[in-house]
Image (spheres, helix red, strand yellow):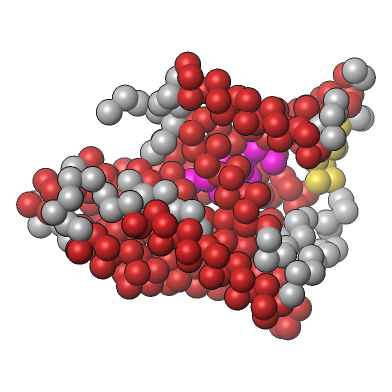
C-alpha cells in the first residue's frame, strides 16, 4: 500500500476515533455509576444532532454556539428519563441485590420511541449543514491533511474527557458520583441522595451527547436511523477501553477508529466494521476488563 494513503487512513482513524471515544464517555459514565446499559444512547445522540441542525436551519445559529442549547436540553431530557421512568424501577425492586433488568429493556423502549417519533415528524431523509470553512483543511507536511471541522471535534473530545475527569475528581458532586459508583449503600449511609446522583449522572451522560452532536453536524448527515450505528460503536468502544474508565473510552475509540479506517483501504467501508467486532471478541477473550479497565 502507498505509505501516503496508509498515513492518511491512520490520521483519519485517529480523528474519528477521538469522536467515537467522546460519544462512548456518556455510556461508560452511566454504566459505571448505575450498572445499567443505556440502549437509548444512540437515540439521544440523534436528538443531539437534530437540535443544532434545526437551530441552523430556522435561526442561522452556528452549530458550535448551539452547544449552549443542546447540552442543557439533553441534560434535561436525560434527567427526566432517569427521574420519571428508570428511578421507579429501582424503588420497586430495591430489595433485589442486582440492578433491575427491566431498566435495560426500558432504555431500549425509550430509544425506539425517540427514533420513531423523529421518523414520524421529520421523515427518513438525511440532512446536513455546510459551514464556510468546512472544506478547508490543516496540512501536515505536503501530503497529509485534516479537515478543520473534524480536527475541532477531535480536540473537543479530548477536552471533554479532561474536563469530566477533573469534575469527577475535584468537585463535591463528582466525589458523590464516584462514591455512589463504588458502593451505593455506603454512599446512602453517608447522606448522599443516591437517586439524585443517578438523575444527575444520566443527565450528564446525555449532555455530553448534546455537545458531541453539535461537533458532528458540520460533517455528518443526520437522520432518525443514525443512532443505531453509533450506539453499537459506543458499546464496543466502552468494552475495548474498559467499562467505567473515562480515559479508556478515548483509547478504545482511537483503536476502533484506526482499525476501521485502515481496514477500509482493503475492503468496503461496510465490511471494515467486521474487524471491529473481531477485536471486540478478542478483547472479551483475553482481557475482559478492557485496555484500561480494572478488576472489581
Residue 72 in the image: above or below residue 290: below
Magenta span? 16-26
Q: Residue at x 70, y 39 (%)?
A: 15
Q: Which residue is drawn at 61% across and 71% down?
A: 116
Q: Where is residue 161 in the image (x, y as percent from the top left)?
A: 49, 44
Residue 74 in the image: above or below residue 191: below
Left/right of residue 202 with respect to residue 263 in the rendered view? left
Q: Which residue is drawn at 75% across and 69% down?
A: 124
Frontmost residue, 228 versus 105: 105
Q: In which quarter of the image is residue 246?
A: top left
Left/right of residue 152 with respect to residue 34 in the rendered view? right
Q: Which residue is drawn at 35% across and 43% down?
A: 32
> Is residue 53 visible from the viewing direction of this image?
yes
Frontmost residue, 224 versus 191: 224
Residue 219 is covered by the magenta coloring: no
Q: Where is residue 143 in the image (x, y as percent from the top left)?
A: 91, 29
> Is residue 187 visible from the viewing direction of this image?
no
Which residue, as the protein is rendered here, is positioned at the far left? Answer: 189
Q: Is the magenta stretch mostly helix, strand or loop?
A: helix
Residue 111 in the image: above or below residue 17: below
Q: Where is residue 39 in the image (x, y as percent from the top left)?
A: 48, 54
Q: Quadrant of residue 10?
A: top right
Amino acid at each position: 500500500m502507498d505509505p501516503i494513503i496508509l498515513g492518511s487512513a491512520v490520521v483519519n482513524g485517529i480523528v474519528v476515533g477521538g469522536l467515537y471515544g467522546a460519544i462512548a464517555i456518556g455510556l461508560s459514565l452511566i454504566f459505571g455509576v448505575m450498572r445499567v446499559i443505556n440502549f437509548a444512547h444512540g437515540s439521544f445522540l440523534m436528538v443531539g444532532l437534530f437540535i443544532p441542525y434545526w437551530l441552523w436551519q430556522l435561526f442561522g445559529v452556528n452549530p458550535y454556539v448551539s452547544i449552549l442549547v443542546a447540552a442543557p436540553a439533553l441534560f434535561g431530557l436525560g434527567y427526566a428519563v432517569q427521574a420519571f421512568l428508570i428511578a421507579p424501577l429501582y424503588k420497586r425492586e430495591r430489595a433485589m441485590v442486582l440492578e433491575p433488568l427491566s431498566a435495560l429493556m426500558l432504555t431500549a423502549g425509550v430509544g425506539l420511541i425517540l427514533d420513531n417519533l423523529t421518523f414520524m415528524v421529520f421523515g427518513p431523509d438525511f440532512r446536513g449543514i455546510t459551514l464556510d470553512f468546512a472544506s478547508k483543511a490543516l496540512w501536515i507536511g505536503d501530503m497529509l491533511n485534516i479537515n478543520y471541522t473534524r480536527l475541532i471535534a477531535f480536540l473537543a473530545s479530548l477536552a471533554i474527557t479532561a474536563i469530566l475527569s477533573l469534575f469527577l475528581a475535584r468537585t463535591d458532586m463528582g466525589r458523590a458520583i464516584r462514591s455512589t459508583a463504588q458502593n451505593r449503600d455506603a454512599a446512602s449511609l453517608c447522606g448522599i441522595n443516591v437517586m439524585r446522583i443517578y438523575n444527575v449522572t444520566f443527565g450528564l451522560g446525555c449532555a455530553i451527547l448534546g455537545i458531541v452532536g453539535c461537533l458532528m453536524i458540520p460533517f455528518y448527515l443526520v437522520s432518525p436511523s443514525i443512532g443505531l450505528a453509533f450506539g453499537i460503536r459506543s458499546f464496543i468502544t466502552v468494552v475495548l477501553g474498559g467499562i467505567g474508565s473515562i480515559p479508556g473510552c478515548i483509547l478504545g475509540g482511537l483503536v476502533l477508529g484506526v482499525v476501521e479506517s485502515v481496514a477500509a483501504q482493503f475492503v468496503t467501508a461496510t465490511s471494515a466494521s467486521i474487524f471491529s467486532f473481531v477485536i471486540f471478541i478478542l478483547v472479551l477473550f483475553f482481557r475482559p476488563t478492557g485496555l484500561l479497565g480494572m478488576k472489581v
